[in-house]
Image (tube, rainbow, N blue to C red):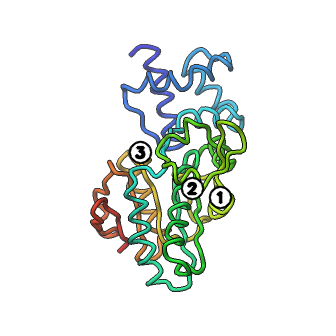
């Protein structure tokens, strides 16, 4: 094994222990592309030195910067579209029928730069416009991510033209965004007010989050080992109220855990209902 491979394996072990992300042997190029600039700025020559520096300064900002760089992924507005239609057409009406007068609680796990929780808030607004007075106590969306830097950006609710162009229809842009500066858009206050951002590592306890009616955990479990994925899914189940729903990404499937979740076909799409 070359020194470079050894350093990569050290870094891979550090990343998995820190946040659960599993890197394949063919991901050295990804690590290099995401960390080269940071390492140059810090005068760090190779990944082995980077890991040593983090271990010698565990409370420093370097560890957070590295995890930010490795976990921050581009995301879309209304990604895959069907989950938001299922929310409006099936899950919210079912919630209202089963829980009259109660407040709907949704968890957006690994929310990245905020597109998913704000899309959820817009979908809830669209439901309320079509069904006035039905969701009497409103809704609360708790959005979590590991990355402190990305949460700061998400809380600002400001996006540039490139970000806005990724999946947002023109009518929603007009209805739900202000345009304070040329090339900058900000999510309007009523949509922001439903969303509460919190820092959370999915490997840590979820107890402080409380209970939810629906959990969106989309396009993140693919980065974990099978064992960690099952552990996360079990602990998500513990946050869901009886009869609550879990929504995974379009390319993700819940293999196993039939004692906890029941697959529900929605045409299009699949959701998982707690047993």
Q: Nearer the viewer, residue 272 or 182?
A: 182
Q: Looking at the image, do the residues carrying marks 1 and 2 touch, with CB atoms under 8 Å apart?
A: yes
Q: Is residue 85 left or right of residue 118?
A: left
Rendered position, 243 above or below 142: below
Per the model, the C-alpha gap separating discs 1 and 3 is 30 Å
Q: Nearer the viewer, residue 185 or 228?
A: 185
Q: Secondary structure at mark 3?
A: loop
Q: Which residue is mark 2?
A: 118
Q: Looking at the image, do the residues carrying marks 1 and 3 touch, with CB atoms under 8 Å apart?
A: no
Q: Is residue 152 left or right of residue 133?
A: right
Q: Which residue is mark 1?
A: 192
Q: Secondary structure at mark 1?
A: helix
Q: Which residue is mark 3?
A: 224
Q: Residues within 10 Å of mark 2 (few under 14, many from 20)?
A: many
Q: For the C terminus, give its image quadrant.
A: bottom left
Q: For the N terminus, give its image quadrant.
A: top left
What residue lies at 68% left-to-right and 20% top-to-bottom? 42
Give the percent coordinates (x, y) of residue 122: 54, 60
């Amino acid at each position: 094994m070359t020194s470079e491979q050894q350093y990569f394996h050290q870094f891979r072990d550090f990343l998995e222990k820190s946040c659960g992300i599993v890197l394949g042997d063919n991901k050295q190029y990804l690590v290099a592309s995401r960390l080269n600039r940071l390492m140059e700025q810090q005068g760090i020559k190779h990944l082995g030195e980077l890991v040593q520096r983090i271990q010698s300064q565990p409370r420093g900002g370097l560890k957070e910067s590295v995890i930010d760089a490795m976990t921050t992924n581009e995301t879309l507005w209304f990604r895959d579209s069907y989950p938001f239609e299922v929310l409006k057409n099936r899950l919210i009406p079912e919630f209202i029928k089963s829980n009259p007068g109660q407040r709907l609680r949704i968890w957006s796990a690994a929310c990245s730069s905020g597109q998913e929780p704000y899309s959820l808030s817009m979908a809830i607004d669209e439901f309320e416009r079509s069904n006035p007075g039905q969701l009497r106590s409103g809704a609360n969306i708790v959005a979590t991510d590991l990355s402190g830097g990305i949460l700061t950006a998400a809380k600002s609710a400001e996006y540039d033209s490139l970000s806005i162009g990724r999946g947002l229809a023109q009518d929603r842009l007009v209805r739900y965004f202000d345009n304070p500066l040329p090339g900058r858009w900000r999510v309007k206050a009523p949509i922001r007010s439903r969303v509460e951002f919190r820092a959370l590592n999915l490997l840590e306890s979820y107890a402080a989050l409380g209970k939810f009616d629906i959990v969106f955990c989309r396009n993140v479990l693919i980065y974990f080992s099978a064992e960690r994925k099952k552990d996360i899914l079990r602990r998500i189940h513990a946050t869901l109220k009886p009869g609550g729903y879990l929504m995974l990404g379009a390319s993700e499937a819940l293999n196993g855990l039939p004692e906890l979740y029941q697959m529900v076909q929605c045409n299009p799409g699949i959701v998982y209902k707690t047993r």
